[in-house]
Every structure is written in C-alpha cells, then in structure tokens.
Image (spheres, grey):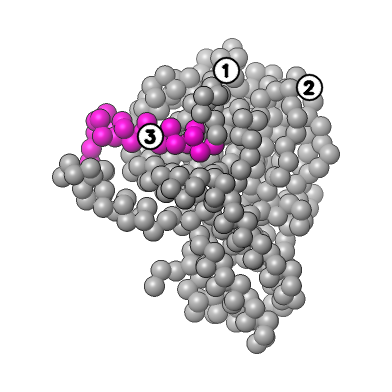
C-alpha cells in the first residue's frame, strides 16, 4: 500500500506523473531510448523544455506580460546568490521570516547593503511581521512566501516602488495570487513540481541590466534567457518530470482548482489541531500555511503511542524540523484530502484512547 507521504521535500508527486516518468526512463517518445539518454539538444527534449516553460508562465497568469521562465540548477539556494548578483547595485530590502530568508540575507550582503525591514526571529519565526515599511529607492524587495520549517505563509504583500523578488519554493502553483506583482519568482522543484535537481525561475525581463558589475555567464539571467534555458546541459529528467506535473495541474483545472483542494486539506487539519487538547499549533493562526502545518503534542507521555499509530496507519514524513520539534504535515498539491483525513483520524483516535 502506498504510504501517506507528508514529507517536506523531496515530496509527494502525483501517481500518474510517477508512472509516466518511469515509463520514459525505459522508452521516451517511442524512441527506444531512455529520457536519461537522449541529447538535450534533440528536438524531443527541446520540445519538453519549451512546453514546461510555457505552462509555467500560463499557470501563473503571466502570459504576454513580459516574463520568461527558466529551469536552472543549484536549487533555490543558488537563487539567493543569483538574485542579488543580477539585481543588487546599492541597497535591497529583505523580510526575514525564517531559515531560508535568513540565508538569502546572508548571501545578498556579499553584493551590497541589505536593509532587513522586519523579522520574526524574536519568536522563532512563528508569525509573519506586520506593519513594516519598505524604504523608498531600494533595488528590490525580497520575501519568502511560505516557510516550510516553521509553517507560516504570507497572505499580504506590500505596495512597492521597486521590484519584488519572491522565494516560492514551497507554495508555487498552490494558490491564486496576482503574480504580476512579482518581478522575479523562484522555486525549487522538489515541493510542488518534480524531483530535486531543477529550479523554476520566472523573471520580468525589464528588471535586468541595471547593475554595473560583470556577471559570470552561468549566473547571468540574461544569458539563460538568450539560450532558452539551455546555456548548459539542463537536468533533463527533473525538467521532464516537472513538465508532467504541470500538465497534471492544467488538467485538474489549474491553480484555482488546486487551491480549493489545498484549502480543504488545511481546514481539516487545523480544525483538528484546534479542537484536540492533545495538540497545539505552532504558528499564529492568521499566518498559518496551507502547505505546511506545524504542531506539537501537549502530553509527551502520548508521543510514543502517537508515533506508533502513525506508523501503523502508513503515515510517513511527519516529524518536525529540529528547529521547531513536534510535527509537520507538508500538504503539497499532490497530497490527497484522503491522506489528511487519515492523519486527522489518527489524531482523533489518540484523544479518544490516550
């Protein structure tokens, strides 16, 4: 029986995507060659890359608005460097809401002055700061929209006179937003798109070319755009599997359709957390993530029993990050409402029998 996979990443993928990807490992496009063996310059893979980029722009509602999509390597962590290398000339504003934004700040300081406009570090990142102001004249504002470790998610975004850069690694394609508010979006594939190994970057071209420093070709967005995301050999399998996931999402009805399912999953688990005296949520309620539910057990004596029940129910990947402890239910797009229901049933049964 397939386990209920709540892993934070690499994470769950749709079963049909796994089947299609595994078939392609043996025989891709009836070529009698594996997708792992074909040239990235072949017409078959060029078509994969083009379709993946097109679907990314379309699903975000950015078609015809001056954006380009890239599939790059190095993970979202490389984008901490690339964003600053390409955009930071004088000062940039950063909102610090967790481990990943904290690391992004550290990398940006190599290239210029960083203004940390607000931080929730004082309470171990269990809330999203409110009421902060972004100073005028910044080169850009950077934020992390969803924080997998702590379980917070930004619901509102500031009005700006500068470009907005967003790390959307853990909630890309999960909810409807006006994505045209963002000038640069990046997201590691291994949460909501595909396997680890590629990172989606969606960038508005007119924000480039403003810094005076020379940029190495491999770190230059303009170079990757000019080469249609094929400046060097791309991670072929990761891009292909991401394409399959994007097709799956389109067939479901796109981002608005999956948002409805994600909201149902979040409502179900947070209702149980709030009603069950054996559990308590880690995050301020107004900042709870639909992707990452973090919670603790209130009776440590019940922990061993709960862990045993989780295992017996086929629930995997629920352990919280060491920075927070407790439990973390990562509910990415491909996780079914049924899996969340199984988890909630276990939590309820623990209350009844503890």
Q: Which of marks 1 and 2 is in front?
A: 1
Q: In which quarter of the image is residue 136?
A: top right
The kind of secondary structure element at disc 1 is: helix
Quick check: is 45 in the magenta stretch?
A: yes
Examine the rendered structure and indicate whether residue 148 appears above or below residue 111: below
Q: Quadrant of the N terminus?
A: bottom left
Range shown magenta: 37-60
Q: Mark 2 points at which residue?
A: 136
Q: Where is residue 320 in the image (x, y as percent from the top left)?
A: 61, 62
| Residue 82 in view (yes/no) | no
Q: Residue at x 38, y 46 (%)?
A: 244
- For the residues labelled 1 and 3, say whether their Cβ atoms are less than 8 Å apart: no
SS state under label 2: loop
Element under disc 3: helix
Q: Which mark is residue 338?
A: none
Numbered circle sitting on residue 206: 1
In the rendered image, the residue lying farthest to the top is 212
Residue drawn where x is 75% and y is 19% of the image: 137
Which residue lies under the disc numbered 3? Answer: 51
Q: Quadrant of residue 255?
A: top right
Q: Which residue is more in the foreground, 320 or 18?
A: 18
Where residue 40 sits: x, y (%)? 28, 32
Residue 86, above or below 349: above
Q: Which residue is drawn at 59% across and 77% down?
A: 346
**Residue 262 in magenta stretch:** no
| Sequence-first disc among 2 and 3 | 3
Real-space Cα separation, disc 1 to disc 3, in angstroms: 23 Å
Q: Dot 1: few (<14), some (14–19), or many (≥20) neighbours within 10 Å?
A: few
Residue 191 at what x, y percent from top left?
51, 50
């Amino acid at each position: 029986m397939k386990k209920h996979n709540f892993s934070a990443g690499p994470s769950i993928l749709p079963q049909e995507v796994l089947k299609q990807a595994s078939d392609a490992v043996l025989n891709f496009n009836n070529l009698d060659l594996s997708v792992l063996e074909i040239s990235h310059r072949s017409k078959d893979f060029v078509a994969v890359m083009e379709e993946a980029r097109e679907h990314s722009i379309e699903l975000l509602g950015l078609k015809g608005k001056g954006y380009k999509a890239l599939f790059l390597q190095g993970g979202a962590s490389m984008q901490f460097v690339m964003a600053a290398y390409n955009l930071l000339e004088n000062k940039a504003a950063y909102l610090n809401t967790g481990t990943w934004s904290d690391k992004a700040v550290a990398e940006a300081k190599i290239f210029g002055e960083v203004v940390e406009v607000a931080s929730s570090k004082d309470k171990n990142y269990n809330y999203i700061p409110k009421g902060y102001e972004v100073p005028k004249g910044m080169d850009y504002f950077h934020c992390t929209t969803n924080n997998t470790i702590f379980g917070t998610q930004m619901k509102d975004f500031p009005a700006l006179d500068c470009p907005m850069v967003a790390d959307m690694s853990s909630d890309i394609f999960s909810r409807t937003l006006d994505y045209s508010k963002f000038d640069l979006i990046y997201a590691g594939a291994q949460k909501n798109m595909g396997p680890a190994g590629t990172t989606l970057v969606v960038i508005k071209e007119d924000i480039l070319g403003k810094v005076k420093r020379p940029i190495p070709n491999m770190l230059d967005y303009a170079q990757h755009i000019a080469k249609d995301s094929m400046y060097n050999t791309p991670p072929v399998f990761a891009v292909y599997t991401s394409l399959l996931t994007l097709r799956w999402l389109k067939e479901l009805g796109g981002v608005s359709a999956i948002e409805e399912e994600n909201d149902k999953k979040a409502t179900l688990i947070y209702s149980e957390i709030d009603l069950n005296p054996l559990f308590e949520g880690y995050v301020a309620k107004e900042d709870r993530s639909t992707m990452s539910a973090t919670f603790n057990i209130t009776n440590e004596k019940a922990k061993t029993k709960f862990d045993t029940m989780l295992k017996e129910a086929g629930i995997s990947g629920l352990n919280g990050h060491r920075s927070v402890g407790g439990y973390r239910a990562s509910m990415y797009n491909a996780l079914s409402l049924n899996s969340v229901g199984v988890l909630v049933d276990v939590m309820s049964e623990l209350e009844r029998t503890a």
